């Protein structure tokens, strides 16, 4: 992306945030199908008959940390690292701009991708991993997984795992439940059955899915973050793209650095 393209994307992001642009997120009161949220002029979803994209470099296998609980909400409090984790859905141009901002600051992030987004934007798996970031599973359709019968909940986890395996060679590093901060015991057990030893929660909610604007996202994160924090954020939200450089600068001023979740906990 040229510097002119980058400025254009960030200006568009800031304008959209000021206007209160909406995109699908982890708000438990919203469960918008990805097919209904497609930006005008964006890349068309992949269709049967088209050549599949080149496989991304191999993703990390599921992270296993002996001694840590099944559900992980934060890392060590005595270090200087934090993990910025992103719900993976939305306009790929915004996602690419956000990843670029992280990379310019020397930061690494964790993206928990939704399976139907990977179906529409398979090249994003490669883009995330090629940037040195981490990729995981946020269910196939972002349904309220903790309210589903066991068979349906397992299908949400395993189908997204299948998409990740096809694109990257593994099922990804982490599983995070959709529309829930923590998994029920049932969902945690189903995640283990699918191959994920841990469920990734978080201790800082940026509230960016409500589109409050970049300054509010920045304040919410920096007011709550500390050593070891796992922060919940979202791709596909203009205010988040605009807020990320401010958040990363605020972390740097406090002597904190953004790393992948696996690096944080290991």
Image (spheres, rainbow, N blue to C red):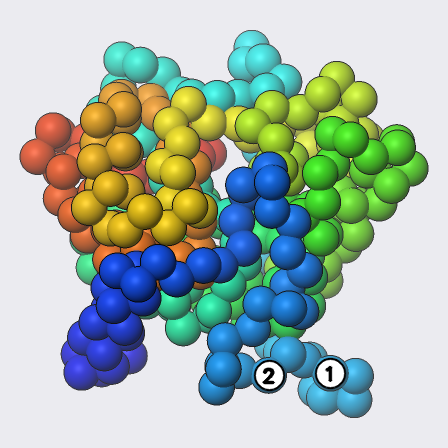
Residue 126 visible? The answer is no
Q: Residue at x 60, y 24 (%)?
A: 182
Q: Residue at x 72, y 59 (%)?
A: 163
Q: Residue at x 31, y 14 (%)?
A: 77
- The quarter of the rendered structure image containing the C terminus is top left
Residue 244 vertical position relative to residue 195 in the rendered view, above or below:
below
Residue reaching furthest right?
151
State the mark number for residue 47: 1
Neighbours of disc 1 within 10 Å: few (<14), some (14-19), many (20+):
few
Element type at marker 1?
Answer: loop
Q: Nearer the viewer, residue 241 or 212?
A: 212
Circle 2 residue: 44
Do the residues under discs 1 and 2 have CB atoms within 8 angstroms?
yes
Picture coordinates of residue 217, whole percent (x, y): 28, 42
Element type at marker 2?
Answer: loop
Residue 122 vertical position relative to residue 243 in the rendered view, above or below:
below
Picture coordinates of residue 80, whole percent (x, y): 23, 25
């Amino acid at each position: 992306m040229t510097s002119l393209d980058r400025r254009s994307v960030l200006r568009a992001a800031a304008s959209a945030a000021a206007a209160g642009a909406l995109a699908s997120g982890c708000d438990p009161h919203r469960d918008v199908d990805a097919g209904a949220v497609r930006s005008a002029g964006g890349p068309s979803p992949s269709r049967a008959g088209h050549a599949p994209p080149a496989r991304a470099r191999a993703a990390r296998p599921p992270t296993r940390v002996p001694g840590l609980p099944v559900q992980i909400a934060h890392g060590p409090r005595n270090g200087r690292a934090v993990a910025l984790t992103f719900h993976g859905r939305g306009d790929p141009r915004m996602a690419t701009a956000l990843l670029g901002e992280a990379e310019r600051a020397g930061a690494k992030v964790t993206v928990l991708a939704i399976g139907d987004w990977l179906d529409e934007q398979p090249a994003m798996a490669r883009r995330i991993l090629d940037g040195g970031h981490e990729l995981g599973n946020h269910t196939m359709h972002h349904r309220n997984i903790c309210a589903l019968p066991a068979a349906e909940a397992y299908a949400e986890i395993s189908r997204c795992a299948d998409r990740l395996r096809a694109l990257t060679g593994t099922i990804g590093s982490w599983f995070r439940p959709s529309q829930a901060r923590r998994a029920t015991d049932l969902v945690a057990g189903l995640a283990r059955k699918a191959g994920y030893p841990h469920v990734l929660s978080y201790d800082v909610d940026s509230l960016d899915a409500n589109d409050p604007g970049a300054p509010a996202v920045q304040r919410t994160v920096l007011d709550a973050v500390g050593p070891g924090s796992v922060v919940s954020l979202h791709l596909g939200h203009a205010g988040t793209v605009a807020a990320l450089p401010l958040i990363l600068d605020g972390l740097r001023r406090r002597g904190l650095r953004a790393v992948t979740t696996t690096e944080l906990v290991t």
